[in-house]
Image: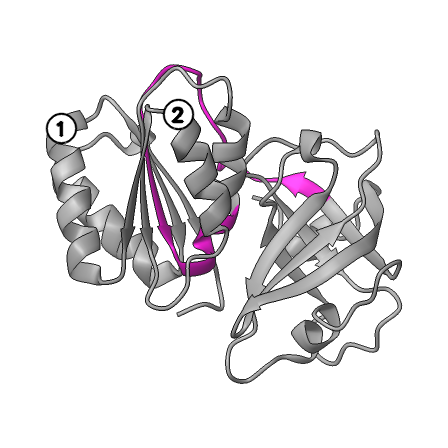
Amino acid sequence: MMKVTNILKLKNKNHLKVISVTNPYDDYHIIKLTVDDKINWEAGEFGIFWLPDSDVKGKKWRIFSLSSIKKEGFLQIGTRTGKEISSYKKHIISLKEGEKVKMVGPLGGFKLKDNKTPLILIAGGVGITPIRSILKQLEGNNKRKVELIYSSKDFYLFEQDILDIAAKDKLVKLNLVSSRGETKKIIQSLVDIYESNAYYYISGSPKMVRASKKIIKSNKIRNKRIISDSFIGYK
């Protein structure tokens, strides 16, 4: 994989403007950005973002998964600031409508492989962001079983969006959990059912991704069936 420092030198930089920045709960924030016809992406991809008009101290860029799909008419990312807010995040959550953001991308391999294999989607906290985009892509045209395990201790980001999708699609089942024990139990029960006949998408903190992978791999699920997206910087 190309290093981020080299990716930032690429010419395919997209110039975006802020539509809105909202704070639905505690330290969770959602940033919506403009898109034009030149910007295309697939559900599950990410971008590398920096703020050209902000005096950010320290690291100037951050990687965010894209939580929206093109037909929604906007590019959306979600993040948590944590208790100690970095200079970058202080600036991005303070952006006003019309202010500029630059993005390299979209990039990444956390994407759907086909349109028929069952999906086991495992999200921890803000790791729901790329999975929301996958669910939006499936919305209205889904032909397979989809199981979402969404683990969070205090707040389910994009919960209403996900509930709306599931309410319209009998093939989509939601498992909203709040503990590691519940998460482990449901993962194991689904592995017992689907074995290597499903794709397992895991998105969240490195610790959460490792723990979920350990359960799945211990059941001899083929590696090519496991797709993961670790959110560096989240515990």
Q: Quadrant of the N terminus?
A: top right
Circle 1 sits in a helix, a strand or a loop, which is it?
helix
Q: Quadrant of the C terminus?
A: bottom left
Residue 88's disc number? none
Q: Residue at x 22, y 63 (%)?
A: 179
Inspect the magenta stretch and tell me whether residue 136 lies in it. no
Which coloring applies here? one colour
Residue holding disc 1: 193
Q: Nearer the viewer, residue 81 or 220?
A: 81
Tell me if 87 is positioned left or right of 83 in this view: right
Q: Amino acid at mark 2?
A: Asp
Q: Which residues are magenta?
A: 105-129
Quarter of image, res 163: top left
On the image, the x and y values in percent for residue 86 come to 63, 79
On the image, the x and y values in percent for residue 49 come to 72, 56
Q: Residue at x 82, y 45 (%)?
A: 13
Quarter of image, res 51: bottom right
User: Is residue 87 among what the camera can see?
Assistant: yes
Circle 2 sits in a helix, a strand or a loop, which is it?
loop
Few, some or many residues within 10 Å of mark 2 (<14, 14–19, 20+): some
Distance from the alpha carbon under mark 1 to that under mark 2: 20 Å
Tell me if 149 is positioned left or right of 55 in this view: left
On the image, the x and y values in percent for residue 79 come to 57, 62
Q: Residue at x 76, y 50 (%)?
A: 33
Residue holding disc 2: 169
Q: Residue at x 21, y 25 (%)?
A: 196
Q: Are marks 1 and 2 in contact (CB under 8 Å)?
A: no
User: Is residue 109 among what the camera can see?
Assistant: no
On the image, the x and y values in percent for residue 56 come to 77, 76
Quarter of image, res 225: top left
- Mark nearer the N terminus (1 vs 2): 2
Q: Amino acid at mark 1?
A: Ile
